[in-house]
Image: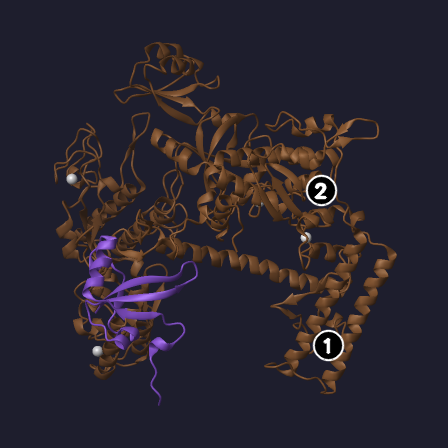
Amino acid sequence: MTKFSLLDHESVPKHEIIAEGELKSVLSKFLIDKEQLPKIKVQDPVSKEIGAAVGDVVKITRKSQTAGEADYYRLVIE
Amino acid sequence: MANVPPIPKRIASIKFGLLSPKEIRKMSSTPIITADTYDDDGFPIDMGLMDTKLGVIDPGLRCKTCSGRAGECPGHFGHIELVAPVVHVGFNKVIRKLLRATCRKCSKILLDPAQKQHFLDQLLAVEGIGHMPDDLINEAYKEASKVKSCPYCNEEQLDIKFEKPTEYLENGEKLTPTEIRDRFENIPDDDIMVVGMDPKNARPEWMILTVLPVPPVTVRPSITLESGQRSEDDLTHKLVDIIRINQRFQENREAGAPQLIIEDLWELLQYHVTTFFDNSVSGIPPARHRSGRPLKTLSQRLKGKEGRFRGSLSGKRVNFSARTVISPDPNLSINEVGVPMPIARILTMPSVVTQRNIEHLKVYVRNGEDVHPGANYVLRTDGRRIKVTNMNKDDLADKLEFGWVVERQLKDGDIVLFNRQPSLHKMSIMAHSVKVLPNKTFRLNPAVCPPYNADFDGDEMNMHALQTEESRAEAKILMQVQENIISPRFGGPIIGGIHDHISGLFLLTRFENHITSHEAYDLLRRSRARNLPEPAGHDDDGKPFWTGKQIFSQILPEGLNMEFTAQVCAHCDTCKKGDCVNDAYVIIRNSELLMGTIDEAAIGAFKGKVQDRIIKEIGPEVGSRFIDDMTKLAIRAIMRTGLSFGIADEDIPKEARIQINEVLAKAEDAVQNLIKSYLNKELEPLPGRTLDETIEMSIMQKLGKARDETGGIADSHMGLENSAVIMARSGARGSILNLTQMAACVGQQAVRGERIRRGYSGRTLTHFQVGDLGSDAHGFVKASYKSGLSPTEYFFHAIGGREGLVDTAVRTSQSGYLQRRLVNALQDLEVQYDLTVRDTRGVLVQFKYGEDGINPTKSDFSKPDTIHRIVRSVVDKKVA
Ligand SMILES: [Mg+2]
Ligand SMILES: [Zn+2]
Ligand SMILES: [Zn+2]
Ligand SMILES: [Zn+2]
């Protein structure tokens, strides 16, 4: 059986774990705590794929009908 | 916003259980032993139904339980010790099932230990995944009631019959509530769990009442009639009955009365307790008041349309509102609403008396309630509310002081909210300014029908008079009609010309109409334009004339420049723009309509580019004024020429009819050929289709094309002066398809997008051969509505038409539910000033509203036109 990456699929947007520094700037940009971010589960196939751990923040770069590309951030939870 | 808990407070679960006799006694503040309510002095009797331990309702008294006054005391339960147990009607179903599932001797559930364990495990599993255990429990009951003799004591089980409303018969012999209770008491806790009951919170014997909780007096307040007599609540009446019978029962039993009398009294007690809970159970006559009116007991308070849930919790009535039929009035502004005089005299606006308005308010008060605009009430600073009458109006006007509030009648210019259900979007409630008018209907400018989705076939609308300065200010700034012309749904105007507005301006602005000065002034009389430009030319008799385009230009606000294709545009391969032969390219330069015809694309609701541009470039006030002027001009314009439609307008010349028949005959031949090749198995299937699908699709396509062709023929013979053609082309009403069906050919009738196939076996109707695949056997209607349908065509048409009706009915209910769910999910999300979308906890939902942060009302139909325009206006060059 051939293995393939979930992220290669057309409909799965780019997911990446962001570094501490970038996280800080995101949180300060929106004046929020990590808890106020939308959530994603660790068991989520895409979390597993990129090796995210609880407490990490994942940056999702989606295609957008209105803006071309849109960034979303999600906090990884149990 | 910091430190938001990861999970908000959430109700983890709600537990329902039965009240045990012990619990009823524990929560009771007093036993109730006497049926009397008040003593001779009018004080509540101790241990009576109005005991002040149960709470107080009369002002001045204090509750003996919590020492609160009326209004502070929430009320407290009491209890009645029943002399003999009675069945609770609400649990009949469970009692019956349990009696059948348990042993009559040892009370164990009639299942062997392995089966019991099986059901327990299953229940646990079902609970674990959060499903409803109902089906499983019913299966357990069913299995247990099948067993004929007890697996534990070998006792033979007898047949249990239930008789309405509360009797249980075992082999024809009545089981008393005491017997039932005894059986239930002996069921072991472990067995109870097998049928999904929780022995800690719901022992089955608690379904047989030995103690009756007495609801607090606050639940059943007595009212004092004008005569000074007290009138008790229905629940209190019922409780009196229960106590009386309970007492008589006890006396008789202590006196050793015969069994027959005891049984009768027991049954009577059961009846009263049953009707106390539910006075509409079948099998017994409902308990009645002395007047013969059935009593409203506990379940009657909750059930039905006027019950607590549907009547008091989900639905409420509001004050300061009015509802009546709507009718059109093109002379009103779109920002106005015509309010009937009778309504204006009942609804009021509160107004605080100040130095500046005291003289005005005195006039209202002096006018009283009969002379409009008058005043209906005066509120004094001490909170007293005084009705203004003809007797006291002058007196009140003289006494008026600063700080008092005068509730004056509604008058012209007041801001009110106007609403039509179903309120599906924000434009379903808009603020209008009042115009008091005679007669009995609300009047509104027909141009505001689209946002309300209103018509005048009997629609009713609601109006709410705003009662605070803040609400009036908010309504005026945010909710006024002119602020809602641009819909956030598609970034275009939802308010604009409809029907005759479009035909009117189309007739006015097309061609080079010659309009005399008299006519010109007549057309513009109702609008704000007051002067005419230089005439376009002079007629042969030397009189000056103006064109319709010039007249329309007079209502355009200053500084308007735009170009666009009109609705009538034929969409030629290369648009000739200014040289368009159909005059379908609109050019407005410096607020002058140079060429092009004004139609739906210019001023229509949903599509009108002109009012859209005016609002976005100049502002809503000018925009609303334009719509007012435009609708008035359009109505005058259509009255100048007139526009009518009759059956004769559907006539087509003989040669057209011949052509149409030829087209249809040819199509029918083509269909026959297709069928022939299908039957001879010569037909090539379309890719991915079966042969049957292929023939159906080919036939549908052939016939569809034929219908369109006939439409084209009819259309070309009717010419552009036909009223229906004018309305269809300008976008005022109707379509070319409607025209085709009226004049040429109705076409294929379909069910679920396919030709009609249902009916008899092998054929749709007995008029056709079995297996006939021809066009007329499967619902192709060759006739036009004008020529009339043949009987079979008529029948097929009815079939196709029915589907349309069912579709709309189903669609409205489905989309209504979808809308409700979306609204519930999204209602408290909010766009913040940093353009993020957050919920009430501050958790982000979108990092930028709509991902681009653009307000759709400020964008041109959600297209980048705005930016192109700005660039053009600055650099004077076109952007690619
Ligand atoms: Mg209607
Ligand atoms: Zn109290
Ligand atoms: Zn037994
Ligand atoms: Zn054109």
Q: Residue B223 carries which label?
A: none
Q: Nearer the viewer, residue B659 or B775?
A: B659
Q: Name the kind of residue labelled 1 in the image.
A: Leu
**In the rendered view, does B347 fall on the left or right side of B271?**
right
Q: Where is residue B764 in the image (x, y as percent from the top left)?
A: 70, 72
Mark 2 CB lies closer than 8 A to ligand 4: no
Residue drawn at (19%, 75%), measured in percent from left and top?
Answer: B106
Q: Estimate the x, y position of residue B695 in percent, counting from the top left.
A: 68, 78
Give whichever of B711, B396 is nearer the camera. B711
Percent across and percent down for residue B241 are 27, 45
Rendering quarter of residue B230: top left
The answer to whether any part of residue A36 appears in the image is no
Using residue B322 as the reference point, say whether residue B725 is left or right of it: right
Give the brown chain's letter: B
Frontmost residue, B74 versus B322: B322
Q: In this rendering, is residue B535 above or below B287?
A: above
For discs 2 and 1, the disc positioned in front in the rendered view: 2
The tag on residue B773 is 1
Q: The purple chain is which one?
A: A
The amino acid beneath tag 2 is Arg
Q: Answer yes or no: are tags 2 and 1 on the same subunit.
A: yes
